Amino acid sequence: MSETTADRKGDIALFLYAAPFILNFVWALYLWSGTGLSRTLPQLVFLEVTQNPYLFFFGFAAVTFGALIDFNSEPPERRKSALSVLSRRLQAIAVLSIVLSFISAWYAANFDLGVTFFNLLDGRYPLVFPALLVFLSFVILPSVRLQGANAKNLLVVVLLVASPVAIHELGKRNTVAGLGVGLILILAAAFLLLRDKK
């Protein structure tokens, strides 16, 4: 651990940012070892982890507390400008979450892209978690105006949250339509979120 108080707070914040990924990995490994380790992650293990509301809640709470620690560790006169940095950091965690979720879903689908998107949509929380992070990054900005990048962020949130809703609701009537609409929504959200990233 680092020597100074500010560095220690930074270490704690970093650990809290990583907590959702650590929790999901540890729980998946525990469930996977219970079913017997195999070449690829069993689909049921992936879905059990990604549909777990407790993992979602504790992961989101950890990132939120990490953001609060980051904000409170800044001197009062620099906190307003620090919010922009914090907003970008939350968006970066959201992008990392989407990328890791996709890789995990792909691995659990035995590298089949069709099943991969089904895993992501059926899991729900891999889409809701980054959507809420983007929403939080949008809300904390000092002056929120519904234009430009802020409108894009809000649209990403809506698309990511709408994806699992579409697969669930439309899927009751027509599985293909539910999967198709859900896939279109998640691809549109990914395009918007990644388009301006360097």
Image (cartoon, grey):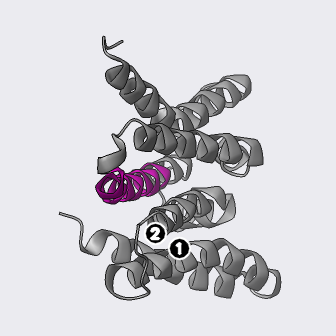
Marks 2/1 in contact by CB < 8 Å: the verdict is yes
Question: Which of the two residues, 53 or 2, is positioned nearer the viewer here?
Answer: 2
**Magenta residue check for 173:** no
Q: Residue at x 33, y 79 (%)?
A: 149
Q: Majority secondary structure of the magenta segment?
A: helix
Instruction: Tell me the kind of residue under disc 2.
Output: Phe
Question: Which of the two residues, 193 or 111, is positioned nearer the viewer here?
Answer: 193
Question: Which of the two residues, 71 or 12, is positioned nearer the viewer here?
Answer: 71
Magenta-colored span? 79-101
**Magenta residue check for 83:** yes
* Circle nearer the viewer, 2 or 1: 2
Q: Earlier in the sequence, mark 2 or mark 1?
A: 2
Instruction: Tell me the kind of residue under disc 1.
Output: Val
How far apart, in angstroms, are the residues tagged by discs 2 and 1?
10 Å
The residue that disc 1 covers is: 157
On-image quarter of the C terminus = bottom left
Q: Is residue 40 visible?
A: no
Q: Looking at the rendering, which quadrant does residue 153 occupy? A: bottom left
